[in-house]
Image (cartoon, grey):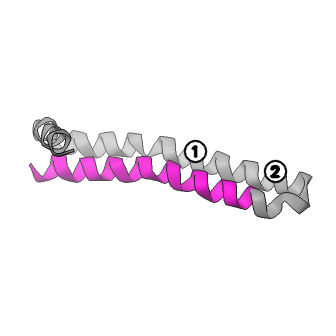
Amino acid sequence: MQVTTEVLAQAAGNINPGLAAIGYGLGAIGPGIGVGLIFAAVINGTARQPEAQGKLQTIGYSTFVLTEVLALIGIVIYFIASAA
């Protein structure tokens, strides 16, 4: 894991901080759309089958967390690039 962190820090060190901010902004669009689709599906499924609400919410929150990890990784890479 240490080698991967060093390689990432070296690669991010060559990025202009302004371009990193634009890249993160564009990269945050994907998780934003993903979260909207996840909860739209949960609402739609609950409207169609109300007795499955608990199970649908559990699946919805689990996939929400996985989607938000992408945005968090993006902001960490942005801070690494802007600090270098």
Left or right, 56 with reference to 36: right
Which quadrant: the N terminus? top left
Sequence-earlier tag: 2 or 1? 1
- Amino acid type at circle 2 is Asn
Position in image of residue 71 (x %, y %): 41, 50
Position in image of residue 38 (x %, y %): 66, 49
Question: Around disc 1, counting alpha carbons within 10 Å, would you say few (fewer than 14), some (14 to 19), or many (20 or more)?
Answer: some
Q: Nearer the viewer, residue 13 or 59?
A: 59
| Residue 1 sits inside the magenta stretch | no
Q: Please tell me which residue is depicted at 91% across the width and 54% down the height of the picture.
A: 49
Left or right, 38 with reference to 65: right
Q: Are marks 2 and 1 in contact (CB under 8 Å)?
A: no
Q: CA distance from mark 2 to mark 1?
A: 15 Å
User: Which residue is farthest bottom?
Assistant: 54
Q: Secondary structure at mark 2?
A: helix
Q: Which residue is mark 2?
A: 44
- Amino acid type at circle 1 is Gly
Please report the bounds of the magenta region as a residue range: 56-84
Left or right, 26 with reference to 49: left
Q: Which residue is mark 1?
A: 34
| Residue 81 sits inside the magenta stretch | yes
